[in-house]
Amino acid sequence: MARTLRIICGASLASMCLLSALFGQSAQFSNESASVLVVQFNNTTTTEFWKQFEVAKKIVALHDNSVLHDLEPWLSNDDMRRRGNAAFIFASLGDERGFQVIKAILEDHSTKRTVFAFDGAGHPSVSGQIRDDRYYAAHLFGDLKDSRAVPILVPLLKDKEVNWVVPWSLGEIGDKSAIPPLIETLGDDSPDMRVLAICALEKLNAKEALPRLSVLLNDDARIHFDGLGSVATAARVAIANLSGQPYSCRLAGKGECACDPR
């Protein structure tokens, strides 16, 4: 880039001025876009935390750290899911506070929190909110794709509150150190966890899992989400793909494995 600019500047002063004007307009447009997105982020309601996350990803895509000052109050917001969305922006833009906030939400079992979850009788459920907040934080680590989260997530493969999302997050992070514990999860009592582990191992291109996957070819236990496929079907798909013989997975009836439990 620097070499290109030297060539342009050497060509003519007029060209350099034009280039500067274009960069100025681009920077102005970027700042305006960031400002608009920050307003959108701030204006989302509690029930729109998924929409807020989509805005968060757009903010991250601008690579504009100037937004962090305006978003800083969100790092202590009462709604931990929306706090997590802000933390995702901070972490993605290189601010260590973001990673630590997500980690803190995931490890927080305290009952002192704003409750949006309800139990079957329609009463506010603190335990349900703890589960929802922690689950969301575990998913955010997958969205963040930071390998530092692997040793935090691996023990949670046995945590009944959040374990469904952990294989997906480990697969998204892409760190090979997650492969051995995921292989161990192939022996989990839950067929859902076995399938989610299979999908994560496939995502990680874990050929070393092939011997354990072959054991599951006779496992006809069915999962309880999306297409309600069997463990054997998921194992067959993964074995084919890891062996270099692509196989179209029909577990979700959409031509692919439905391994994102969000």
Image: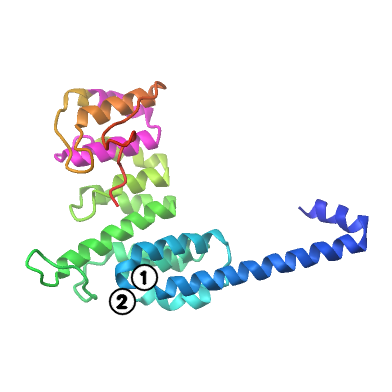
Q: Residue furthest front?
A: 253
Which amino acid type is marked by label 2? Asp
- Amino acid type at circle 1 is Arg
Residue 56, x across and y down, in percent: 45, 63
Residue ID for mark 2: 78
Q: Quadrant of residue 26?
A: bottom right
- Which residue in the structure is indicated by mark 1? 83
Q: Badges 1 and 2: C-beta atoms under 8 Å apart?
A: yes
Residue under the image location 79 percent in, 55 percent down: 2
* In the rendered image, the vertical position of residue 16 relative to residue 247, given as above or below: below
Within 10 angstroms of label 1, few (less than 14), some, or many (20 or more) residues? many
State the residue at coordinates (19%, 32%): 230
Vertical order, 64 against 243 (above or below)? below
Instruction: Give, as a single range, the part of the protein colored magenta.
Output: 185-214
Residue 102 position within the rendered picture, expressed as x and y whole percent measured from the top left: 36, 63
Query: Which labelled disc corresponds to residue 138?
Result: none
Q: In the depicted view, which residue is nearer to us: 133 or 178?
A: 133
- Which residue is most to the left? 121
Q: Position of residue 73 (x, y in %)?
A: 42, 78
The residue depicted at 34 percent of the width and 35 percent of the height is: 256
- As helix, strand or loop, the secondary structure at mark 2 comes to loop
